[in-house]
Amino acid sequence: MVQNIIDVKNLSKSFDISSKEPGLKGTIKHFFRRKTKSLKVIKDISFEIKEGEIVGFLGANGAGKTTILKMLCGLIYPSEGSILVSGHLPYRRKENFLKNVTLIMGQKQQLIWDLPPIESFYLNASIYDLDKFEAKKRIKKLSEMLEIDEELFIPVRKLSLGQRMKSELLAALIHEPNILFLDEPTLGLDINAQRNLRKFLQKYNQETNATICLTSHYMKDITSLCKRVICVHEGSISYDGKLDLLLKKLSPVKEILIVCRSEKDAIKLVNSGFTVKNKIKNEITIKIENNSITSSLKTILNNFEIEDLFINEPPIDEVIGKVLIKKDYDI
Amino acid sequence: MNLRKYLKVYKKFLHTSLASELEYKANILVDLITAILSLVGSIFLLSIFFQNNGYIGGWKFEQALIIQAIYTILNGVTNTWFNPNLTEIVKHIREGTLDFVLLKPIDSQFFISLKKINPSGFLEIMLGFFLLLFCIRINQINLSLSFLSLSLITMGCSICILYSLWFFISTTTIWFVKTWNAIEVLRSFLYIGRFPLNSFSFSLRVFFSIFIPIAFITTIPSEVFLGLSQMWKILLEVIVASVFLITSRKFWLFALKFYSSASS
């Protein structure tokens, strides 16, 4: 049986936030008497993650995804509740725990700006107490997986964002951690760079059985990497389960574009009882429930003069977008 | 603490920061010229003060030069290690890159205090030592083992006090986010350390001994060089330095509990 590697129970986090009224008067008031209030950004959440799982955290901006990730890796203290990661209390940041985890943030970097990435890799290797031979072996292996070579010897400031992100990944993985926390790792990357990064993460997970917790606003990252998602809405978990179940629940119908031979045929189809979304001359878009697709298509093809037919999946971004604004999903 | 690992990491720190600095040759050259001009300017200023009066606060010009030499060494240490690292703490906290430091299996205070060096500060340290050797000659000071060890102890304590003060102020960034001004105030107080403590009024002497211990930073090591220091003063400096160092360490560990990282 696969062990739980992350165990979170009734976790909450509050921050003291100060607010300021607009204008000069507000600024002066804010300077002398700062109004602060305690804001609960994570509210009593519980979940477990098994070893080797890839879990995507979904939520709107400010929902609390990054705060959860930062508590899991031990950067910030929880206000209430308990977290166990690989048998450790993360916020104690014990050496054995830190040697097992890594955090990669799409918008922050740890590489030394003026030097080639290779220098940062060897610095990290010495921090993780790796000897030169072992470090060299790991750099070679990871750079082959990430398909980077010459870039290792070019100053970071001269690298493209995609090359830099690959180097960041290498720097963060040189100690071969078994838990990866990724906070929007594909942010700002072009489509090819995003795809390569996803390919690498998939391969890394398969080869090392590492657990990956990922936040991303690019739905492609989530759909191609995560079987399970945790949706966060205003600090609470609104859904925790399989991604495909969520998608089925959220989009129970498919759209079918039918090109009829003539407008007369199209009118006949409109009047046959299907739910029509729109009609332009001889082209009709109808909505059919997922569980009756086969029988409905059979009826259409047998009874109407059809020139062409397209089955459209609703755009994933549109579907997931519904999760970000809804509080609860019972599936 | 694994000393071998820490030495290995420090060697890497030295290597990477030297390599980073050497990427910008012109900047290094300007820094070196500035260090030389700054020392010449300070000695010139000191000589103006002594032009009409042979003594200030009971110190002759030749004796006051020792304070200048010690100040130059300490300023060199500041520019080599404290300035590039401790001012960076503010940036680490504001931009949230402290996250990377805290997630490394290494002492975070060691990492943020020693990661970078500024090679041009070395020149200042060397210039300070040359000036000190010159002062030893003109003041006809006899070098002995006990004299050398006392000098090293007091200078080491001065560095510890200076580091702790600076580190303490930088740590408050965790709550106040911006503390550049406080560091600038500390640096301006250090300029005062170029002059003998006795040249100030009684109230200022008390202030610079108790609240901002400038007296401990430059005057006591200088008195050791001139054979004017009493043992109790040296012992007091050792105690003050230890208390400052331990307090800054405890304060850092306490402050980290309040670190909330920057939003992404």
Image (cartoon, coloured by chain):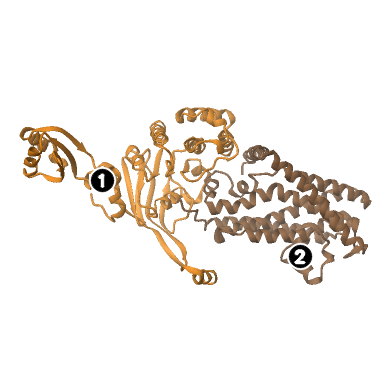
Chain colours: A orange, B brown
In the picture, the disc for residue A132 is none
Can residue B224 be seen here?
Answer: no
Q: Secondary structure at mark 1?
A: helix
Question: Which residue is nearer to you in this view: A284 or A275?
Answer: A284
Residue at screen point 87% across, 47% down: B133
Chain containing the residue with disc 2: B
Can residue A222 be seen here?
Answer: yes
Q: Position of residue A161 (x, y in %)?
A: 48, 38
Mark 1 = which residue? Answer: A246
- B195 to the left or right of A119: right
Question: Which residue is nearer to you in this view: A97 or B226?
Answer: B226
Q: Position of residue A302 (x, y in %)?
A: 6, 32
Quarter containing the N terminus of chain B: top right
Say above or below: A35 vs A194: below
> Which quadrant would residue A253 be assigned to in this image?
top left
Chain containing the residue with disc 1: A
Say above or below: A37 vs A101: below
Q: Position of residue B200 (x, y in %)?
A: 82, 67
Residue at screen point 47% across, 44% down: A103
Amino acid type at mark 2: Ser
- A139 to the left or right of A287: right
Residue at screen point 39% across, 43% down: A214
Mark 2 = which residue? Answer: B209
Decide: few, some or many residues near mark 1? Use Cα within 10 Å; few <14, some 14-19, many ≥20. Answer: many
Q: Position of residue B77 (x, y in %)?
A: 73, 49
Q: Nearer the viewer, mark 1 or mark 2?
A: 1
Decide: few, some or many residues near mark 2? Use Cα within 10 Å; few <14, some 14-19, many ≥20. Answer: some
Say above or below: A277 vs A164: below
